[in-house]
Amino acid sequence: MLEAIHFAATKHRDQRRKDPEKTPYINHPIGVAYILWKEGGVYDTDVLQAAILHDTVEDTNTTFEEVESKFGPEVRHIVTEVTDDKRLPKLERKRLQIVHAKTSSHKAKLVKLADKLFNLRDLNRVTPEGWTQERVDEYFRWAHKVVEELKGTNEALENELYRLFAQRGITEI
């Protein structure tokens, strides 16, 4: 775990979240892993490492081969499943997250649930710079569609996500 945290921290060292405080980006993957462990009761090292590494290929110069050489084929597989192809337009990437959610492995679904939970909580905490309330609301509606496809993965995480959706009045697709 510490090797994954160190690796991700090095890769994300110059990145910041889009909140007004410019939170260090590494707080996000660490938070995703923490949610899995603390709230989801997930203790599988491969899942937790993948949670730490889930944005490295998408947002840094990391390759899937590098992830596999350092953390093994199972972690690579999970990271591959949760990584968006940045060569595609944003709307297509979002559409594909919904399409691929249901057929993802159980381990990838866990990472995806915790990632959505972290992001939604962050949006409730503070609006990212440059985001309108409409964009925040749209993110919640889109996240709901993704989570609908992940049902049956982890009751504790799903219950918390649906509680957040209900607070926003989002109850159906």
Image (cartoon, rainbow, N blue to C red):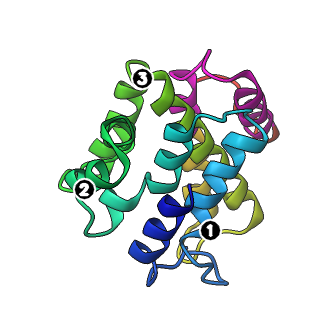
Type of amino acid under label 2: Lys
Query: Relative to residue 62, is residue 25 drawn left or right?
Result: right
Which image quarter holds the C terminus?
top right
Identify which residue, 136 or 56, lies in the foreground. 56
Coordinates of residue 26 in the picture (x, y in percent): 55, 70
- The residue tagged 3 is 105
The magenta stretch spans residue 165: yes
Q: Are marks 2 and 1 in contact (CB under 8 Å)?
A: no
Type of amino acid under label 3: Ser
Please state the extent of the stretch shown in magenta in the rendering.
142-166
Secondary structure of the residue carrying numbered label 2: loop
Q: Is residue 142 visible?
A: no
- The residue tagged 1 is 27
Determine the CA span between mark 2 and mark 1.
Answer: 22 Å
Q: Residue at x 52, y 79 (%)?
A: 16
Determine the CA span between mark 2 and mark 3.
Answer: 21 Å
Q: Are marks 2 and 3 in contact (CB under 8 Å)?
A: no
Majority SS type along the magenta span = helix
Q: Which mark is residue 14?
A: none
Q: Residue at x 36, y 34 (%)?
A: 74
The magenta stretch spans residue 44: no
Which image quarter holds the N terminus?
bottom right
Label 2 crowd (10 A; few <14 / some 14-19 / many >=20):
few
Coordinates of residue 46 in the picture (x, y in percent): 49, 39
Type of amino acid under label 1: Asn
Q: Quadrant of residue 113?
A: top right
- The residue tagged 2 is 86
Coordinates of residue 131 in the picture (x, y in percent): 55, 69
